[in-house]
Image: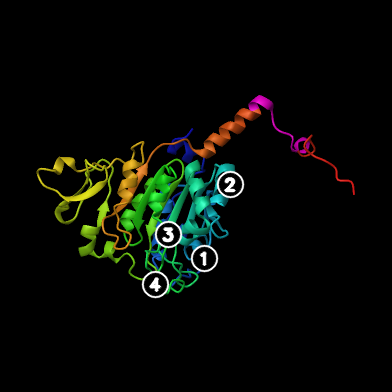
């Protein structure tokens, strides 16, 4: 039982209709005025009723960082855990309580620095989690140090002469970890963000959504190239499954594969090359093209940045596989005896 509908059926439905108000907690929202987190919170709160799930069967788990205050503001169950460990804690919860809809909220520092290994192993296992990775390319909570996604040369309090590190591309990283669902969206594009959330919620297994989120205090304007209407036409590549990958004014630009190198490149679309423009296939078994798309964005200028669902494929879900394995063990050997296990042959008595 691995399809999305079957997995959702394990989570109890809500009684009666719900609204955005039902998912707002009584806690005062404490982010800096103008922070992009507000937009994401509002989008998630307004989207949750569409799931039709009982609030007591929805859980938000976070790590440490500005975004990790998220569970306080959701009128669901939640846990503000420890730095980088949210995917690990959420994995234990999702595998032991399949009647829960488990969401992880994390940031670029929390997920990609101390939490890097926890993130990639959740992705490769394909645990039934939805991971929202807020990326503002800075450490906001600790007051403006460079993060694993900060561009090379970034001047911050911890890199006064400019960062020497090459930044992570979270989407590329997720695809390299064989994630079954990978998407990118922007905090200020409410319609796009909600659509991506909906697709992630319907996906069986781990879904990672990178959300470009503005920190107006320590890294203001980091994503202006993708938000300014004039710049965004040439900078943003909106991916839609089954549609040619075209963008720019009047969709004059397109993405093609270079026949010599196999790499992707941007061209001005003409009658001669229009047939060469790639059609986006989010369900392709191989992540090769999705990875190539993720590499189009220039890490410094963000020019040619794809947003939308890059990959959405069916893979066996870890929770289901584990449950099936446990059922088979019980059927074959009966229920285990914990006391016998603890006092079995692999124990010893210390005489002092």
Comes first in the chain, label 3 or label 2: 2
What's the CA distance linking mark 1 and mark 4? 38 Å
Residue with the mark numbered 2: 92
**Which range is magenta?**
331-341
| Residue 155: numbered disc | 4
Tell me: 253 left or right of 65: left
Name the outermost residue toward the left: 271
Residue 138 in the image, given as x and y percentages of width and height: 42, 66
Which one is in front in this view, the residue at disc 4 or the one at disc 2?
4
The magenta stretch spans residue 87: no
Residue with the mark numbered 1: 26
Residue with the mark numbered 3: 134
What's the CA distance linking mark 3 and mark 1? 23 Å
Comes first in the chain, label 3 or label 1: 1
Residue 124 in the image, given as x and y percentages of width and height: 48, 43
Task: Describe the element under mark 2 as helix, strand or loop.
Answer: helix
């Amino acid at each position: 039982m691995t399809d999305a509908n079957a997995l959702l059926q394990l989570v109890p439905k809500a009684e009666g209709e719900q609204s955005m108000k039902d998912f707002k907690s009584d806690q005062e929202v404490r982010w800096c005025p103008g922070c992009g987190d507000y937009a994401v919170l509002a989008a998630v709160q307004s989207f949750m009723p569409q799931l039709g799930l009982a609030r007591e069967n929805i859980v938000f788990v976070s790590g440490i960082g500005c975004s990790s205050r998220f569970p306080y503001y959701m009128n669901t169950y939640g846990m503000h855990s420890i730095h980088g460990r949210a995917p690990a804690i959420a994995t234990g919860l999702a595998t032991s309580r399949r009647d829960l809809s488990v969401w992880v909220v994390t940031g670029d520092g929390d997920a990609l620095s101390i939490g890097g290994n926890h993130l990639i192993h959740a992705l490769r296992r394909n645990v039934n989690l939805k991971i929202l990775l807020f990326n503002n390319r800075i450490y906001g909570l600790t007051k403006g140090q460079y993060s694993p996604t900060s561009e090379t040369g970034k001047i911050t309090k911890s890199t006064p002469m400019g960062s020497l590190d090459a930044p992570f591309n979270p989407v590329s990283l997720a695809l390299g970890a064989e994630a079954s669902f990978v998407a990118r969206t922007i905090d200020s594009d409410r319609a796009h963000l909600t659509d991506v959330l909906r697709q992630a919620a319907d996906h069986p297994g781990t879904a990672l959504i990178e959300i470009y989120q503005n920190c107006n205090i320590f890294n203001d304007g980091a994503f202006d190239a993708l938000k300014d209407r004039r710049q965004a036409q040439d900078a943003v590549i909106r991916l839609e499954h089954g549609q040619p990958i075209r963008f720019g004014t009047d969709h004059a630009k397109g993405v093609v594969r270079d026949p010599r190198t196999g790499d992707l490149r941007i061209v001005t679309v003409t009658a001669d090359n229009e047939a060469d423009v790639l059609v986006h296939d989010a369900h392709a078994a191989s992540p090769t093209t999705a990875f190539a798309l993720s590499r189009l964005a220039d890490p410094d200028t963000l020019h040619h940045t794809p947003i939308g669902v890059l990959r959405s494929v069916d893979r066996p879900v870890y929770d289901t596989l584990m449950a099936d394995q446990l059922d088979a063990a019980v059927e074959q050997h009966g229920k285990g005896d914990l006391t016998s296990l603890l006092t079995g042959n692999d124990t010893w008595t210390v005489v002092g």
